[in-house]
Image (cartoon, rainbow, N blue to C red):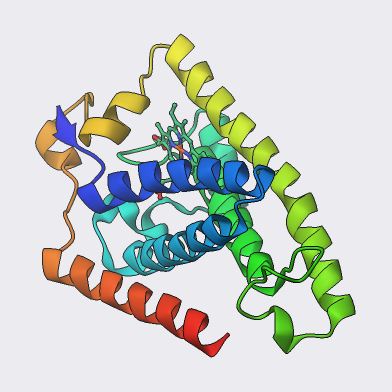
Amino acid sequence: MVRVWDLPIRLFHWTLAGLIAFSWYSAEEQMLDWHLRSGMAILFLLTFRILWGFFGSSTARFSQFVKGPAGVLAYVKGKAESGLGHNPLGALSVIGLLGVVGLQTVLGLFAEDNDGLMAGPFSLKVSPDTAETLTDLHEALFNVLLALIVLHLAAIIYYAIRGKKLVGPMVTGKAKVEGDAATHEMQPGKPWVALACAAVAAAVTWLVWSVG
Ligand code: HEM
């Protein structure tokens, strides 16, 4: 057993999954003040994750798992080892999920509800027509996000059927790997760097909230 996911990645993942479910629920139930808070929390998480993708542990870094088309093809054809962390194909799903959640969050900043009582922090910075269009897009994009989440879960079930269990490692941080475990060890990020990333993410979130 070797470490594969650090604590920040695991906290990020499960909090994000919970907040997306809660965002959906609070929108359905018209609890728009809670929907707004949930969206701001997602903004914080995503900003943190992007920073951690540059300054965090080895398996969190985009440079380690994002591969070009040739890298993805080689992996699909079975010509490339996936190594520790996300495989080149899974990386596409990670980028898709992070990208769509990010776009969804930005659209939410400009959205407003029908009576204008509840509005994203930037909704008054654009014309009412633009705010309406962005609100429609915010609603429509949720279906795309839902499709990506279904695909994400289907991939996890597919790997489980083929005997590769992924959920346990995302909970405990540890995975069984073949070969020399020492050479597979994750290079952990520094705790003070994680705190600095969290502080920058909090500052960005606060700025977005207070400027709006
Ligand atoms: C709203 C729902 C969800 C979203 C938006 C989501 C998003 C993500 C993202 C962005 C990653 C990449 C982690 C990173 O490097 O930052 C990831 C990985 C992962 N997620 Fe989810 N997730 C969701 C639900 C779930 C659920 C319900 C499960 C388990 C049943 C799950 C299991 C996993 C696993 C096992 C990985 C690691 C995959 C690998 O080994 O490459 N996710 N997820």
Outermost residue to the left: 182
Q: Quadrant of residue 212?
A: bottom right
> Residue at position x 10%, y 38% from top?
182
Quadrant that contains the N terminus: top left
> Residue at position x 78%, y 64% from top?
135
x, y percent for residue 106: 63, 69
> Residue at position x 34%, y 41% from top?
85
x, y percent for residue 109: 63, 72
Looking at the picture, tell me which residue is in the foreground, 29 or 182: 29
Looking at the picture, tell me which residue is in the foreground, 142 or 23: 23
In this view, 91 is above or below 151: below
Q: Is residue 112 left or right of residue 178?
A: right
Looking at the picture, tell me which residue is in the foreground, 1 or 178: 1
In this view, 17 is above or below 192: above
In this view, 63 is above or below 132: above
Look at the image and tell me whether residue 70 can be seen. Answer: no
Ligand 1 quadrant in view: top left
x, y percent for residue 139: 76, 53
